[in-house]
Image (cartoon, rainbow, N blue to C red):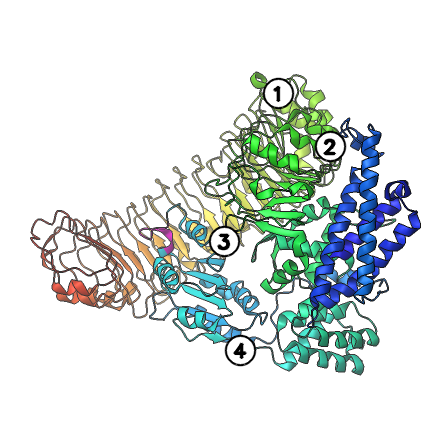
Amino acid sequence: MAEPLVFRVGKLVDDFPEAAELWGTGDTEMEDTFSYLQSIVPDAEKRVLSDESDKDIEQWLEDPKDAFYEAEDLREEWPSKDEKLKQVIPSSSPSAKPDLRLEMSTRAKKIRKRIEAIAAEGTDLGLRECAVVVRVERRERLDAFVCDEEIIGREDAKSVITKFLLDSKTDDQIPVLSIWGDDGVGKTALARCLYVDDMVKKHFDLRIWVNGFRNLEGELRKIRGRETTEREDDVLRFQRYLLVFDDLRDEDPEQWGSLKSLLMGGARGSKILITTRDRSVAVCTSTFPSYRLAGLPIKSSFDLLMRMACLEEEETGNSIKVDIGRKIVQKCHGIPLAIRMIGSLLFCKKTEEEWLHLLRETSEFSKNLSRLSYIHLPCHLKQCFAFCSLFPRDWVIDKQLLMSLWIAEGFIQPIDNGDWDMEDIAHDYFMDLLRRNFFQDCVKDELGNVTSCRMHHLVHDLARHVAGTEYGRIYHSWPYLEERAHHISWDSTLDFSQGDTYLHGAYRLRTFIKTSQRKSLRCETQMGEKTLHKLISSFKFLRALDLHDSGIEKLPSSICELKHLTFLDLSENEGILIELPEDFRKLVNLRQLEISDCSVLSHMPQGLGQLTLLRTLTDFLLPRNDSCPQNHSGLGELNKLSNLRGSLRIEVKGGIEDVVAESNAANLKEKDSLVSLVLVFARKESDEVLLKEMQPSLDLRSLEIRGYGGTRFPSWMSCMPKLVRLRLFDCTACKILPLLGELTSLKHLEIGELPTVEYTETTELNLTELVILDLSWSKVTKDWGGWRKIKMEQLKVLNLTSCTDLLISPEFSSFLNLEILILERCSRLVHLDPSIGGLKKLLCLNLKSCTELNRLPAELGALKALKELLIDETSVHDIFLQSDSEEVEHLTSLSILSANNSNITELPSGVGARLRRLSLRNCHRIRKLPESIGQLGSPLEELDISGTCISELPGSFGNLQRLRVLKMHYCFIRKFPSFIWHLHSLEEIDASLCRNIEGDIPRDIGKLENLRILRLRNSAISSLPPEIKHLWKLETLDVCRCDKLHELPALPLV
């Protein structure tokens, strides 16, 4: 990793007119030394990384890196002629004190002699000079194949594992299958391919991907939708989930047993898929025979290699290249990671000789071909790759963050004679590493742009190896900093209360970033002002500083002395960080400032507009009048920040004296690189003038407005041709919506809490791209009003929650692609249009709390794709499904039917073939259930008839072998049906307050080996059989107020 550093320092010398004075030698002598070192470092790296690694050379490589950092630091201490930098040079700088200038020159001479000695030692080690290779790469095809997720040669494996995943008839509570095999053989890639498969996505309600046991507790909170990880009454048990543990290692069997017990609540058909390199882990965890993933066959390996090499049709006919390719493939041993990386190398090689040379090199790196890929990286990409060693293994790397850090460290080389922004060049670097398979598992946004990735653990190990002592990670169990470290990552387990004990001698640090997960449940790190000042005082050469979610109350003014600082993240210091230092304008090299989720931050310091290099500014705050400090930035400061890009949030906390002048000064219209803009107002009348003058660029993709106090929106909002997302919230005084006709790219329209808004456009318009329309809590007239004039043929989600004036639903013929329809809490809705029967793709219909709705259209029966029907708290009496034949089945995909607290009297016999959850709680008018629900093979897993007048369960319910939860709390059941004790999947029975059930509980209860919860509270039972001791999974037995029960039998030991 010394090569790029040598290049950087050499360039500094070239650009420095006073080099001879500083180094005490002629320009050419220093240039020759740097040039020689640059030519021998690649040979040193190659020898260190090859199978025959040389420890002496490995030790030697650390020396030039350290010496060149010292040289670069010294050069940057020398006064710059840049006037911006002069603003922050203290009076004690060398330009002011000749003795310091002499001292620096003395230091430079020592560094020069050290570098010359290192060069001489390199000669003694026999290092060979390497010619500078100009790499010409076919970049025009770069993005076309880089994220290709197709798996080659794994058809049999995919077939076997897909069958396992889609099989819902297994007797296991939570079936587990483990995939094991050698490193790099493609276990994760195969699991990922199955994870995103369309059939798999449709089969499971919920899919979760975790790496080992890392952050599993957080994932369990996510899937339960709450803080606790207790199982009882959680969301998980209602859902069929797929949980993938990727790269599970030799974990404690007890830990795995506890975890598996915790996950037992999932719906029938839930599955766990594990990938591991350890066969013993696979055997320990699998309930099915584990699957060994072997290397690819030769033919598949060769096909993959040729594909990665992207040979043109005429090149595949080149017998020499084909023969070389077959020989290379044999050295890859069927490992897809190696094949992909070597294939990507061949992509850059055009001649037969280059292919032959690469074949010879594979013999030197046969143990780890990824190292050969690193050797062939261009100089500028080597340092970018090594930087990734700062992230923990299996870390989800945010692309934008990574590129910003590369820029901050000076890794991005400007293109000569090219009008390219640094961010565009950084994107090119990222995609180049991605194409070379140093990154994988890409996640893309809705526009197809890569937003994040991971590194294979073998590649991550390589990054840590080549990074050496230059990069390091510190945390609670390893709080040690290498003396030569220049780039450090840390996490929230560190305790900074004792000051900088972890960072003694950290004055040479360039990077100090935090890699803890965002939005931690509690901030473990508490960074007081004194501690932070002590740390920052050591960070003389710092470029990147990440203090997000670190308990910071106040930034010390000393941070403004970090004249090289380019990246600063203060986000998520929520409710703590009050203000930024007054001299913040001195950070003239700052390119990225992250201050999102700092809720009590009151204003921006005066002079922010002087930070003209800023590319990212997440938030800009205007203070309230009553708390307005004298020295704060107005909107005019944004005028000078012409290079802002990405997302910007502007919050106006109070009124503005000269609204027109202030808003015009922001000059948002000229900020063409802004993609997303959020405007938060203080509900003032002056907001109308302010918003009118804050017109953004026509290139804006996302616009959100909150708390707007005006009565109408400005005309420019109707002329945004590239706008994809428009969100309007809490604009309570607004009377008229903006016209939508010219928003031709709009895909997401969300309007919330606008109680007096109605769409009034008179002409018909077609929003051809609109996918999501959300009008929750807003004013929609009783007959759908002006919205009827809008054609939304691509609409997939329509959310009208709490549109309380709506009497008649929309006519649905123009929403033929609709998948989710939410009319919850439309309390005056009385009519659901029959055209709903034409929504062939509808998956979810939510009519909860439509209290005046007493009838469902018969056409509802035609919705063969419908999976979820929610009619809780409605006045619906019957679900009458129209058909021309009594034998026609309706709602054939319906898996969830919930009608709690409704007036329903009976269920149609045609419903139930695929029901997994049926909830009729407190439906007092229903007296019986249809036999069809218990038909043979029924997938029903949860039945809740609590509070109904049902007195007997149909005999066909004995077929419900997948039933896991039976709730009949406070109903008229006279006795437990005999078949209930043969439903071996039952985990919970609730018969509380069933006062008609009396006498003895049958001895057959001992057969319910999976029973966890038995509630008999306030019933008339008189005894429990001794067989209850066989219920070894029983956790809850509730017999409170069972007055006739005088004693308990022996209970199971848990």
Q: Which residue is mark 3?
A: 819
What distance separates the C-alpha of mark 4 from that of mark 2? 58 Å
**Amino acid at circle 3:** Glu
Comparing marks 2 and 3, which lies closer to the viewer?
Answer: 2
Mark sitting earlier along the chain (3/1): 1
What distance separates the C-alpha of mark 4 from that of mark 3? 34 Å
Q: Which mark is residue 156?
A: 4
Dot 1: what SS?
loop
- The residues colored magenta run 229-236
Q: How many marks?
A: 4
Q: Which residue is mark 1?
A: 686
Image quarter hosting the C terminus: bottom left
State the residue in front, 474 or 413. Answer: 474
Residue 951, image x and y in percent? Answer: 17, 55
Residue 788 is one of the magenta-drawn residues:
no
Mark sitting earlier along the chain (4/1): 4
